[in-house]
Amino acid sequence: MAREITLSVIKADIGGWVGHSSVHPEVSAVAEGRLEEAISSGLVLDARRGRVGDDTALIMTHEKGIDDEAIHEFSWDTFITMTEKARQLGQYGAGQDLLSDSFSGNVRGMGPGCAEMTFEVRPSEPVIIFLADKTEPGAWNLPLYKMFADPFNTIGLVIDPNMHGGFLFEVHDLMEHKKVTFKTPEEIYDLLVFIGAPARYVIKYVYRASDGVVAAATSTQRLSLIAGRYVGKDDPVMIVRSQSGLPAVGEVVEPFSLAHTVAGWMRGSHHGPLMPVSWDNDTPTRFDGPPRVVGYGFQITTDGKLGEPRDMLGDVSFDNARRRALQAADYLRMHGPFEPHRLSLDEMEYTTMPQVQERLAERFEDVPEGSC
Ligand code: 13P
Ligand code: 13P
Ligand code: MG
Ligand code: MG
């Protein structure tokens, strides 16, 4: 039997250089040093540091399964050590995503985001890890739907006998802490009712229906729901396996040619296009954005080595998407503080609205019903 490994991607914003635009090289070096130690001590099989904007992702392969305490504690301690360096360097919002004072067994609910999956490594295992900044976990709903349920994106659904049986989408309700699984293509209308509302319903896993093989996993932490106030956006990560009975690499990256609209951007309070970018252009700058996504491609070996990552969204074939994103950004920015550029009221509840409402409550007078 082929070897089972776990791929863990655990991320946090531990301070920005400058503002919320990037990670200081010395802070990144702390993460890289810690990951080197984890490899040499045998804690992990292999590891890489990923980055998008002010967020750092620890990308690790190991044999300990998901939710493993040692892996999560190592990640937490790494973020703490990075935060110390970030504080020394006066980085903006140092320790931003570390919402708890001490580690308690799992990073879930403590601020950092995590996407993990355990699978048998195929002789060739192409995996793409997407990292996004200035947006929320629901940002992956549309691309995942396209990859695994839309034949106009993924021709493999039609012509690859191993994909023709469809996929299972595990959707989480982040408000009620419930989950439900939909089978595509049969239930796409039911699925879309929920995932079309990405602030609340988020695809957590995708599995191949014919044999239950895991195909995709996302991070689903909502910082504002944990902290009860605005503490920066969640800036999610996603793992997608590809080829041989799963979408081809080209089908996995294709949805990002749209630069679809997501929630996030300035102060986590605006809609903007999710711009696919190269690793060299991962720095949200204009109005702290626009939101962006990078892709790290790996050919994982059967002994769990990640190998050299490839920059999957830097290619010229995404230039039109970038252009469209910048045009959409111009258009939306012109709306200033008006919806739909600004998020709708129910998504703004962790900002000033409740305080302003309270302060002005007495100035609101009844309007008699039926008056014109
Ligand atoms: P190759 O014939 O180059 O292996 O490509 C097959 C494929 O999956 C293209 O998407
Ligand atoms: P981050 O969520 O990336 O820290 O951004 C916060 C923010 O307020 C940007 O304007
Ligand atoms: Mg930040
Ligand atoms: Mg961020």
Image (cartoon, rainbow, N blue to C red):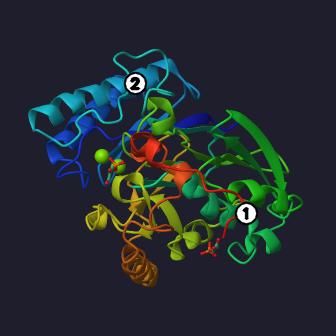
x and y percentages locating residue 334 in the rendered image: 37, 78
Q: Residues within 10 Å of mark 1 (few under 14, many from 20)?
A: few
Does the image show residue 125? no
Quick one: 159 or 111, which is closer to the camera?
111
Marker disc for residue 102 = none
x and y percentages locating residue 182 in the rendered image: 82, 50
Name the residue: 17% across, 36% down. Answer: 86
On screen, residue 219 above or below 100: below
Occupied quadrant, residue 230: top left
- 318 left or right of 48? right
Quick one: 194 or 210, which is closer to the camera?
194
**Tag 2 residue:** 42
- 289 left or right of 87? right
Precedes in sequence: disc 1 or disc 2 = 2
Circle nearer the viewer, 1 or 2 = 1
x and y percentages locating residue 94 in the rendered image: 22, 36
Tell which residue pokes out farthest to the left in this image.
89
- 281 left or right of 354? left
Q: Quadrant of the C terminus?
A: bottom right
Does the image show residue 62? yes
Residue contact between numbered discs 1 and 2, judged by CB atoms under 8 Å: no
Marker disc for residue 370 = 1
Ligand 2 neighbours mark 1 (CB distance < 8 Å):
no
On screen, residue 254 above or below 6: below
x and y percentages locating residue 315 in the rendered image: 40, 76
Occupied quadrant, residue 140: bottom right
Badge 2 marks a residue whose secondary structure is loop
Quick one: 104 or 246, which is closer to the camera?
104
On screen, residue 230 above or below 280: above
Name the residue: 86% across, 59% down. Answer: 165
Badge 1 marks a residue whose secondary structure is loop
